[in-house]
């Protein structure tokens, strides 16, 4: 299969797709000199991967470059348009190739859209080496990809492309548009409106070239990009900046600011379950024992979002946001478990006091297991509960209540 067939009828983004790492722009943290992916590609020894990053950051391109690093067959399916029967057909072809000594690289775009049963179908074939699986996802694989598949793959995180990187891609692509010249201010605007997405930038460039004469101007770019790119990316810089601002506004007790950032995320297409999960964490981490009703409320909001979804779910998120923003804050539960974990790591062999040990046999009772343990409502025993070396340790400091 020719991965890079030259067909001028293909979209510009596909025609200028890099064929080698030397042509690839961006993601130096994984493809730079000495980095994991570059080493793997150079050696021609691919392994199963999950490529996690925003749209237009090179996931498909990297999969194709990996497949071309050796004598590998390349199969590509999209979880949006494919189902289990399609997966089985690909696996069957890969099994036949394996008999002939050829490995198959299978690229699954938007793998997070496959359900658990569909993802399970890959497991035995990844395990036996019938396929080298490369999954691409814009969603956090911790939540969207099943654990057994994650454990058999390496997660590679891709970052949004910078404006300068987008500009470099645009400049190279302009050479593929005979008779066209691109004004510098038009190129800059195109890069800014693309929000780190090379595919958006190249699509806009192609449209602007069709609208323009010999010169692609600022005005032709504005016409091509009729609706400026929303300043939000579900897994890019705006995603992290807005969720950070949202949580910090909740922590600071500003319901108005929290609601604004909530609205920005929802309008940007953020998964409401992601926001609800953060509310559950916040309720325990930042409110905790100051208001023990906060956690049940946040969990109820998450469950309601799962059952109802959008658009009505925005009201549920609004209610939970206001409640948690105006609730008293207390981080003692967070600090207490952190301190306890530190103590557990520093004292891994600390012995449980004899009077707290389980005594299911007579021998254990004779050895003093469980001896002198007393309990009744309101009774505060004088015996200690922590190991001797930690008997004076305090992880949690109660208040007047």
Image: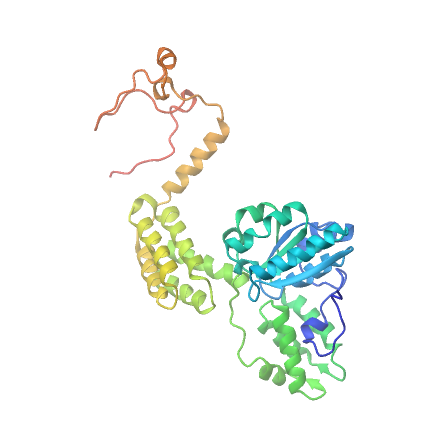
Instruction: Let me know if residue 159 appears in the view.
Output: no
> Where 81 falls versus 298 (above or below)?
below
Question: Which x, y percent locates residue 161?
Answer: 63, 64
> Where 387 falls versus 101 (above or below)?
above
Question: Which x, y percent locates residue 266?
Answer: 43, 66
Looking at the rendering, which quadrant does residue 395 occupy?
top left
Residue pushed farthest bottom? 213
Question: Which x, y percent locates residue 135?
Answer: 61, 56
Residue pushed farthest top? 366
Q: Which residue is drawn at 45% across and 59% down?
A: 245
Q: Is residue 83 left or right of residue 210?
A: left
Question: Which x, y percent locates residue 287?
Answer: 34, 48
Residue nearer the viewer, 69 or 320: 69
Question: Considering the image in quadrants, where does the N terminus appear?
Answer: bottom right
Q: In this view, does 356 lie to the left or right of 122?
A: left
Instruction: Let me know if residue 293 appears in the view.
Output: yes
Q: Could you tell me how many numbered marks the image carries?
A: 0
Residue nearer the viewer, 87 or 60: 87
Q: In this view, does 160 lie to the left or right of 395?
A: right
> Where 198 falls versus 390 (above or below)?
below
Question: Considering the image in quadrants, where does the C terminus appear?
Answer: top left
Residue nearer the viewer, 128 or 161: 128
Q: Which residue is drawn at 46% across and 30% down?
A: 344
**What colouring method underlies this structural image?**
rainbow
Q: Residue at x 68, y 78 (%)?
A: 184
Q: Is residue 126 left or right of residue 280?
A: right
Q: Which residue is drawn at 45% across and 62% down?
A: 271
């Amino acid at each position: 299969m020719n991965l890079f067939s030259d067909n001028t009828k293909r979209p510009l983004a596909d025609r200028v797709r890099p064929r080698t790492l030397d042509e690839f722009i961006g993601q130096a943290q994984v493809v730079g000199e000495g980095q994991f992916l570059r080493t793997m590609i150079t050696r021609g020894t691919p392994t199963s991967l999950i490529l996690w990053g925003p749209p237009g950051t090179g996931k498909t391109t990297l999969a194709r470059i990996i497949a071309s690093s050796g004598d590998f067959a390349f199969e590509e399916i999209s979880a949006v348009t494919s189902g289990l029967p399609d997966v089985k057909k690909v696996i069957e072809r890969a099994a036949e190739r394996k008999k002939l000594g050829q490995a198959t690289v299978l690229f699954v775009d938007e793998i997070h859209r496959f359900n658990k049963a569909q993802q399970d179908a890959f497991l035995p074939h990844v395990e036996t080496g019938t396929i080298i699986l490369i999954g691409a996802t814009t969603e956090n694989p911790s939540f969207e990809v099943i654990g057994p598949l994650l454990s058999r793959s390496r997660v590679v995180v891709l970052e949004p492309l910078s404006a300068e990187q987008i500009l470099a891609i645009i400049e190279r692509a302009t050479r593929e548009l005979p008779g066209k010249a691109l004004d510098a201010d038009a190129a800059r605007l195109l890069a800014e409106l693309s929000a780190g997405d090379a595919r958006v930038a190249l699509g806009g460039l192609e449209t602007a070239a069709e609208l323009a004469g010999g010169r692609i101007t600022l005005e032709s770019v504005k016409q091509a990009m009729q609706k400026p790119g929303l300043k939000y990316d579900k897994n890019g810089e705006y995603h992290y900046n807005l969720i950070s601002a949202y949580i910090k506004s909740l922590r600071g007790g500003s319901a108005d600011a929290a609601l604004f950032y909530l609205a920005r995320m929802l309008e940007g297409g953020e998964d409401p379950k992601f926001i609800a999960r953060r509310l559950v964490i916040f309720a325990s981490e930042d409110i905790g024992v100051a208001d023990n009703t906060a956690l049940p409320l946040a969990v109820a909001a998450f469950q309601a979002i799962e059952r109802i979804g959008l658009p009505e779910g925005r009201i549920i998120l609004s209610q939970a946001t206001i409640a948690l923003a105006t609730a008293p804050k207390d981080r003692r539960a967070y600090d207490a478990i952190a301190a306890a974990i530190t103590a557990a790591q520093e004292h891994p062999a600390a012995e449980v006091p004899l009077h707290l040990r389980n005594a299911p046999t007579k021998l254990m009772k004779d050895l003093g297991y469980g001896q002198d343990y007393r309990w009744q409502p309101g009774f505060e025993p004088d015996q200690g509960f922590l190991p001797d070396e930690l008997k004076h340790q305090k992880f949690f400091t109660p208040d007047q209540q």
